[in-house]
Amino acid sequence: MRTEYIKDDMDRAAEIIKAGGLAAVPTETVYGLAANGLDAAAVERIYEVKGRPAVKPLSLLVEGPRALDEYGRNVSAGARILVARFWPGPLTIVVETDEKIPEITRAGGTTVGLRCPDSHKTLAILKNCGLPLACPSANPSGAPSPKTAADVAGYFDGRIEAIVDGGPCLLGTESTVVDMSVSPYRILRQGALPAADIREALIGALQVVGVTGGTGAGKTTALEALKDRGALVIDADAVYHDLCRSCKDMLSEIERRFPGVVEDGVLQRKKLGAAVFSDAKALAELDRITQKYVIAAIDEALAQHAAAGGRYAAVDAINLIGTSLEKRFKALVGVTAPERDRVDRLMAREGVSREYAQMRIRAQKPDSYFAAHCDHTLHNDGTREQFRAACDELFDRILEDEHHG
């Protein structure tokens, strides 16, 4: 077989593919070995030429976002967010597959990976073909991925119909593959697109409200108003306590700084308290250690909520002001209340004495602090019904809420 080398004639490359041939094509990541993804015989040749195991499915190169509905089904909101942000680009999104995708292309599975490449030549081929292209990297299985047309020729000259020369690949690293057919979503292969960028794009699609305030002020009622709008409510304190039980990295870092406070993988709270509560510097160091893990866990929860189609979220913590979480918030809301009401609530909720409740509340930030540092304040000095109505009115203004607005 004579391999045809194509520089500028993308119509010719499309003709070869539509006729059942194989053509190596450039992308911004690496060169791919392309065939008509709907032609089972052509796809079988890819497996033969590459020596690729039949149990490994092939991803499809597609022209743009419309492919999600053409070749996928039950496509998640998260998949659409990522497509809008990163296509064309080095991101392969796995979705449930439509029946029109041949079994050999998906290796008998029920999902398919879709990617829109950032290569004007390959996009032109896709447009001229009007077909999805099954397109793994253009190398024998196990060999280094090709970054130039010459690399491809070294592998497949005389074994495939064409090589489209698009010059050196700009990135030289395979695409990142993220499975959006499952919840929580999973990164199956870390490639050219960082996982952090994926997370940021998902979180950026949410409207997040921060809710802060002292003990007994009424944050629970405010959070209920957000939850009734479908918001994911994240309690930062609960996240911290969960990490104290489950996060080995955080516990190891705490133990390195405060030796003896972790025994057999269990945080000894009294020992930790004795080490930090009378030492402002030590307490600040503990906060620095734990805060990064808490924020990472909150970010992951926000991203997964957006991927599942969530629109709103709320983060609840006494200490939100001045943390890096503030950049996430559409608004930061402080909840305040008269001291007498806070004392009564704390006594009823926790069974503590009035003196202890007063001491605990007076050790926290005053109302003026929240008024000075928050975008909005909700003062809880009436009945529960009146306060709930004030919460609803404020959140109607903050959020683009089609149901309540």
Image (cartoon, grey):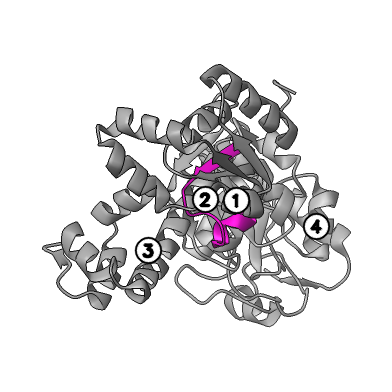
Residue 290 numbered tag: 3
In percent of the image, x 79 and y 52: which residue is there?
126
> For numbered disc 2, what is the local secondary structure?
loop
Query: Is residue 17 found left or right of 43 in the rendered image?
Result: right
Tell me which amino acid carries mark 1: Ser
Residue 80 point in image, percent of width and height: 67, 42
Closer to the eye: label 2 or 3: 2
Give the image quarter of residue 258: bottom left
Tell me which amino acid carries mark 3: Thr
Residue 123 numbered tag: 4
Q: Is residue 165 visible?
A: yes
How far apart marks 2 and 3 lie (CA) works out to 25 Å
Q: Which residue is mark 1?
A: 368
How far apart marks 4 and 2 lie (CA) works out to 60 Å
Residue 279 point in image, percent of width and height: 31, 73
In this view, 315 is above or below 258 = above
Residue 88 point in image, percent of width and height: 74, 57
Dot 4 or dot 2: first in sequence order is 4
In percent of the image, x 57 and y 36: which residue is there?
97
> For numbered disc 3, what is the local secondary structure?
helix
Dot 4 or dot 3: first in sequence order is 4
Pointer 3 with pointer 1, Cβ within 8 A:
no
How far apart marks 3 and 1 lie (CA) works out to 27 Å
Pointer 1 with pointer 2, Cβ within 8 A:
yes
Dot 2 or dot 3: first in sequence order is 3
Residue 366 numbered tag: 2
**Quarter of the N terminus within the rendering:** bottom right
Crowd band around label 3 with a 10 angstrom C-alpha radius: few (<14), some (14–19), many (20+): some
Crowd band around label 1 with a 10 angstrom C-alpha radius: few (<14), some (14–19), many (20+): few
Tell me which amino acid carries mark 2: Pro
Tell me which amino acid carries mark 4: Leu
